[in-house]
Image (cartoon, rainbow, N blue to C red):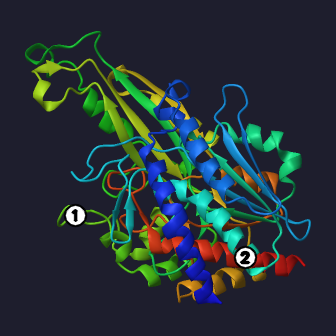
Amino acid sequence: MTSDNLDFIDQMWDYDILQTLMEYIKIPNKSPHFDKDWQAHGYMDQAVKLLSQWCEKHTLPGMTLEVIQHNERTPIIFIEIAGSNNDTVLLYGHLDKQPEMSGWDDDLGPFKPVLRDDKLYGRGGADDGYAIFASLSAIKLLQKQGKPHARCVIVIEACEESGSYDLPFYIDALKERIGEPSLVICLDSGCGNYNQLWATTSLRGLVGGTLTIDVLKQGIHSGSGSGVVPSTFRILRQLLDRIEDQQTGNIILADLHGIIPKERLQQAEQAADVLGHSIYQDLPFVQNVKPESSSSSDLILRRTWKPALSVIGCDGLPIIADAGNVTLPSLSVRLSVRLPPTCSPDKAALALKTTLEANPPYNAAVTFTTEDTGPGWNAPATTPWLTTAIDQASLNYFGKNAVYMGEGGSIPFMGMLGEKFPRAQFLITGVLGPESNAHGPNEFLHIPTAKKLTACVASVIAAHFENSA
């Protein structure tokens, strides 16, 4: 039946999904954080309508679909599908997108869908517009086969890329309708390669904010200022040295760290055995640039369980073409700190602010304003039935065992669900593999992986029913 299942999924993707997914890519439905006028522009409504109409075209027995939008909040698509018992599986994805970003190849673009070989290029296809199609198709496969499944609830939100700030409201408002899921499947994560099923075991937290340094009321000629006025850039270097070891990139601020569980250390070693040097060789390094560590397992831990500092934006430095001989009066940089899954983002944010603002060099005016915080997530221990189901699905459709690894990004929804449904098991997975470049230029969806993942989701849902029967 495995080949029959893939034949069905191939048909769904090739003839029912890809064309609509390409239309979705064309819509610039950027997350509200990146489009303050998202309501007036109407792109989010277009995306919701497009995906909802596809689902309605493929309505299943016992299925209801509702688009829910409360006042000024972003909308969600809420789907319920009756099951053969009273248990519940919750499937999650999102439809909002990151902004365009520069650097796309000349024949590609963020809102220009391009099919090339096994890849569909364009913003949002893999992150994660495909999720609603894969979720409904997986359940459709089970019903076609006459296989029983638990009641399924599909939630597709529209502000995940802005921190899912509306989602807690909807989860609370829909608490009775959602019920008490015993299995949560999230399709917004990554995969270490395209050769097997990858299960995400943890997600990092996040603190983001703006560090501002002021030394002058206005810029002055550098002939007068240099050597007298302390450089804002030098002050920035000194402040960042309070957070990060400039030689190694290691975070030296204790409140930004967390204890790495023994199981996660073992899984990092196992994932490193599978990935080898591809953990960094698949990245678009400039020639001869080396990664931060020569150990693959250490690199995995550095991007999943160890804190890391990035400077992701800057104001106050003119572009080179406009750079005159001026002593700059101020400098602002946007800092992003990825946190270990178990580190408190509130505690980390306070530590950053206190450390950066205390005793500033040259008594400069220094402020750190926290703008984003998000909790990390560490999955509960996986029960034997789910471990078996995940491995069997991977063997059936990829031909190799599943691999378990933490993810370097954040999905705020997971931490919230972990608190609200402490007895639930989790399968967090996705299609964002090597070079897929979510949030960056030339983002793509690897279509064969998406197809196999769809079949794996169906397999796990079927195993869930067998375990709960």
Q: Is residue 124 left or right of residue 198?
A: left
Q: How many marks?
A: 2
**The quadrant where residue 445 appears:** bottom left
Q: Amino acid at mark 1?
A: Val
Can the viewer see residue 342? no
Tell me what residue is drawn at x 62 percent, y 57 percent.
132
Q: Residues within 10 Å of mark 2 (few under 14, many from 20)?
A: few
**The quadrant where residue 98 appears:** top left
The residue pinned by badge 2 equals: 144
Pick whichever, 95 or 211, lies toward us: 95
In three-dimensional space, the C-alpha distance between marks 1 and 2, rounded to whole angstroms, equals: 51 Å
Can the viewer see residue 413? yes
Q: Please tell me whether residue 211 is drawn above or below residue 308 in the rendered image.
A: above
Q: Quadrant of the N terminus?
A: bottom right
Q: What percent of the width, then of the height, locates residue 271?
A: 50, 78
Q: Please tell me whether residue 413 is drawn above or below residue 29 in the rendered image.
A: below
Tell me what residue is drawn at x 10 percent, y 21 percent.
324
SS at circle 2: helix
In this rendering, the label closer to the viewer, 1 or 2: 2
Q: Quadrant of the C terminus?
A: bottom right
Tell me what residue is drawn at x 82 percent, y 76 percent.
148
Q: Please tell me whether residue 58 is drawn above or below residue 72 in the rendered image.
A: below
Pick whichever, 127 or 351, lies toward us: 127
The residue pinned by badge 1 equals: 289
Q: Amino acid at mark 2?
A: Lys
Pick whichever, 455 or 36, lies toward us: 455
